[in-house]
Image (spheres, grey):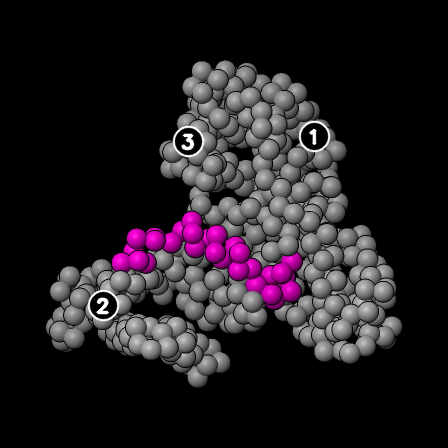
Amino acid sequence: MFENLTERLSNTLRSITGQARLTDDNIKDTLREVRMALLEADVALPVVKDFIEAVRQRAVGQEVSKSLSPGQMFVKIVNDELVQVMGNAAEPLNLSTQPPAVVLMAGLQGAGKTTSVGKLARMLKEQQKKKVMVVSADVYRPAAIKQLETLAGEVGAEFFPSSVDQKPVDIVNAATQEAKLRFVDVLLVDTAGRLAIDEEMMAEIKVLHAAISPIETLFVVDAMTGQDAANTAKAFNDALPLTGVILTKADADSRGGAALSVRHITGKPIKFLGMGEKTEALDPFHPDRIASRILGMGDVLSLIEQAEQKLDKAKAEKLARKIQKGKRFDLEDLRDQLQQMQNMGGIGDMLDKLPGMGNMAQMAQAQVDNKMFTRMEAIINSMTPQERRNPDILNGSRKRRITQGSGTEIQDLNRLLKQHKQMAKMMKKMKSKGGMANMMRGMGGMMPGGGGRFPGM
């Protein structure tokens, strides 16, 4: 997300960062470029106008003229205003009510409401240890009820059954009673969507809202719709007392206009970003971290949180102990590392969160074949335990058996073995004097611009 905007703004602001003095001329040129970058990112025009005016007023004020490095101060102002536009601070779900806390999900058809219910149920269950029940009030789409039942089973949430011959209000009232009997903490209600906003839909969801008085009413919107996302959110906000927004398919939107427009137009905070199809792909929305990423400054805090949640600490510690004892880094260890990297979203996603790595992240995304890790894992899985622990024994006949078993080519296997050797050398450097510094120097040969490429490029 934000790749195009990040590239444009990084190039634009680089020219002003080194300026010892800001003048009307260089501010005017830079602001014109910033304005064009925001419009190309599909940010709503009123948002762009207010943003540029706010930056201009602060840039010609006292805080820049008194600064030791006016150029850098200007970049800080742009960062602060981006944070302001998106809502200053992260706003978590408000669940402080007598259980069950009812959360109503609203939005157009195809926005990702049902999937978001599953993702939210998983997040509440795993991270906040809540007992969660889900119910579908979508009586127009039988597949939606079945889909929610499947998701509930996948994430370990309780499912309240419903059918197309029931009234949505009756379904939700019955679910609320059942949730009380089962001592459920949070009841997530999936509602019917339409292909467009219509009076019948709005009237139905108003009645539903009045019947259950949810503590949170979340509007689910597709980030790919750009400015339309903000306009649709406004229409729903006029009909319902929304408390927040979930922006879905954010990983597929390279512009990011919706994220920058929704808060300004609706006055309601974005609470979560849907970053993929998997049930764990829901991230809390942190305006300050998103602004930092847009300006190419990275998002280390999110990377650390992601690592804490998704990395297998036991495997990491086991590998560290093994390397410290001078034992060999084998193909089973490599397979574990590949799985950990995939859990973290891949190379591109990890680099995207590191300061100054914006362009490198884009290069990685463009050049690394996403199926490469799956192929590498399949090759390793086709080996015997002895072969994984000692790849030196792999002769021609063994290689043929492995590639036939994994559906790959001999050159894929040879490439994997070469990359394994490079990583094994790095792990040796970790143990030797200078540890991490030596390892990073070794990685330089595998990085773009460092005399080499990422594995598989």
Judge the density around disc 2: few (<14), some (14-19), many (≥20) Cα neighbours within 10 Å.
few
**Visible in this render: residue 379?**
no
Disc 3, SS: loop
- The residue carrying mark 1 is 240
- The residue carrying mark 3 is 157
How many numbered marks does the figure carry? 3
Residue 7 in picture, x, y percent from top left: 63, 69
Kindly report which numbered mark, 3 or 1, lies closer to the viewer in this rendering.
Answer: 3
- The residue carrying mark 2 is 325
Taking the view exactly as shown, the residue that stands out farthest to the front is: 433
For marks 3 and 1 on the same chain, the one whose residue lies earlier in the sequence = 3
Q: Nearer the viewer, residue 180 or 151?
A: 180
- Please report the bounds of the magenta region as a residue range: 291-318
Residue 404 in picture, x, y percent from top left: 20, 65
Residue 331 in picture, x, y percent from top left: 24, 66
The amino acid marked with disc number 3 is Ala
The amino acid marked with disc number 2 is Lys
**Residue 429 located left or right of residue 28:** left
For marks 2 and 3 on the same chain, the one whose residue lies earlier in the sequence = 3
**Residue 226 located left or right of residue 397:** right
Is residue 304 on the magenta stretch?
A: yes
Is residue 260 on the magenta stretch?
A: no
Residue pictured at 34% horizontal, 53% vertical: 313
Kindly report which numbered mark, 2 or 1, lies closer to the viewer in this rendering.
Answer: 2
Instruction: Measure how far apart labels 3 and 1 are at the Cα level.
Output: 27 Å
Residue contact between numbered discs 2 and 1, judged by CB atoms under 8 Å: no
Disc 1, SS: loop
